[in-house]
Amino acid sequence: MNLFDVYSLFDVVPVRAKGCRVWDDKGTEYLDLYGGHAVISVGHSHPHYIAALTEQLNRIGFYSNSVVNPLQGELAQRIGKASGYEDYSLFLDNSGAESNENALKLASFHTGKDRIIAFRRSFHGRTSGAVAVTDNPAIVSPFNANHKVTFCELNDAEGVEQALQQGDVAGIIIEGIQGCGGIHVPETSFMQALERLCHTYGAVLILDEVQSGYGRTGRFFAHQWNGIRPDIITMGKGIANGFPCGGILISPQFQARKGMLGTTFGGNYLAMSAALAVLDIIEEDGLIENAYHVGEYIKFHLPASPRIKEVRGRGLMIGIEMNEDVAPLRQKLLFDYHIFTGVAGKNMIRLLAPLCLTLDEAKQFLEAFAAILKS
Ligand code: PLP
């Protein structure tokens, strides 16, 4: 049997990793500025993370959500305290898309309505509802296309209000910073308008913090730069540093009902011990502050070049938009300078490094990038 061939692959076989470094099967060392799609938050193979997972596996690996798992309650307390959302509740699942799916469902249950407002260039995942609110027709099948979704322009509060006036809107879903769509940071006045409009029209504000969350931008959640409190916040990617885990924070206005949401693997012991270890490391190593400082250092010290069109982002969520196709640049970074980077569209290099990236590692990238731009 062969693999279903849906991924474009670089010919690299990682076999070992530590911090922001990865080694392949030939012993070549790489600098990781992508964290495997923003998943490696506290660095690869942190000793505390390994110890937590190993110890947990030696005790009990899995049981279902029909018994008490104290680690789930502990994680809820810890996330509540770290994020400032202590009065919210936590529902645990397995991925970013599943978190968004649950958030959309909850918004619809809560309001009894069925339309969602999403934004141009959004990405929310590939499951049915999540992909329907994603602005990329290439990945929306006819089956997914039956949801009622209105796409508005980012930062266009008037357009959003017009859509809300139809009276059938359950919720608005927006990324803290648009990631896959090209690192677009929403304006604070716009985010505040969304919060206000949701209150006025009885819609649920859902903040997708799957990529921008957990410290990457220098705040626990990216929307905390905007001084708003959404009704639901969705999480995934870095929250368990590579152990599949997702979750949503739900404001106190929502009423839980038995069986309303559910999942087999969500909140399992291994995911919980991984997620708790991630919070320990973020706090002990000051990674939120580090992400902000090192990220801003990179942005400030990028070489001046007519080949760069614009640099966007916050902390370690950085988009370098070029006036050219970036594929050859990324190839050079990877194969000549051994640096992993990401991409958004054809013209953007996207950096989503682990939050423990050091200044020396940032300088290594900046020197390589400057040399490539000169060549
Ligand atoms: N939301 C955002 C903002 C994302 O960037 C992604 C993945 O890239 C998702 C949701 C989907 O997450 P997952 O791939 O874990 O389902």
Image (cartoon, rainbow, N blue to C red):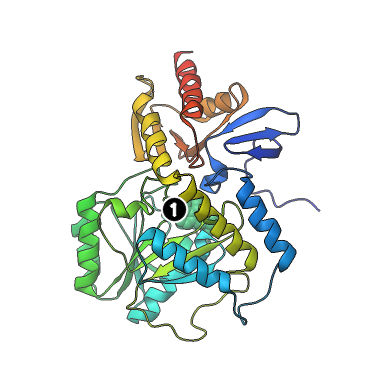
**In the shown orientation, is residue 83 left or right of residue 76?**
left
Quadrant of res 88: bottom left
- Direction from residue 224 to residue 138 in the image, left or right: right
Q: Position of residue 226 (x, y in %)?
A: 26, 53
Look at 37% across and 45% down and name the residue there.
Answer: 218
Q: Position of residue 142 (x, y in %)?
A: 51, 64
Q: Mark 1: few, some, or many residues within 10 Å (few <14, many ≥20)?
A: many
* Residue placed most toward the observer, 161 or 233: 233
Q: Is residue 146 above or below residue 120?
A: below
Residue at x 38%, y 30% (from the top left corner): 297
Left or right placement of residue 17 versus residue 275 in this view? right
Q: Is residue 183 left or right of residue 243?
A: left
Q: Quadrant of residue 151?
A: bottom left
Secondary structure at badge 1 equals: loop
Q: Would you name the residue on which mark 1 appears?
A: 214
Q: Which residue shows up at 49% across the image and 26% down it?
A: 360
Q: Where is 69 relative to 363, above or below? A: below
Q: On the image, which quarter does residue 221 sit in? A: bottom left
Nearest the camera: 367 or 127?
A: 367
Q: Amino acid at mark 1?
A: Tyr
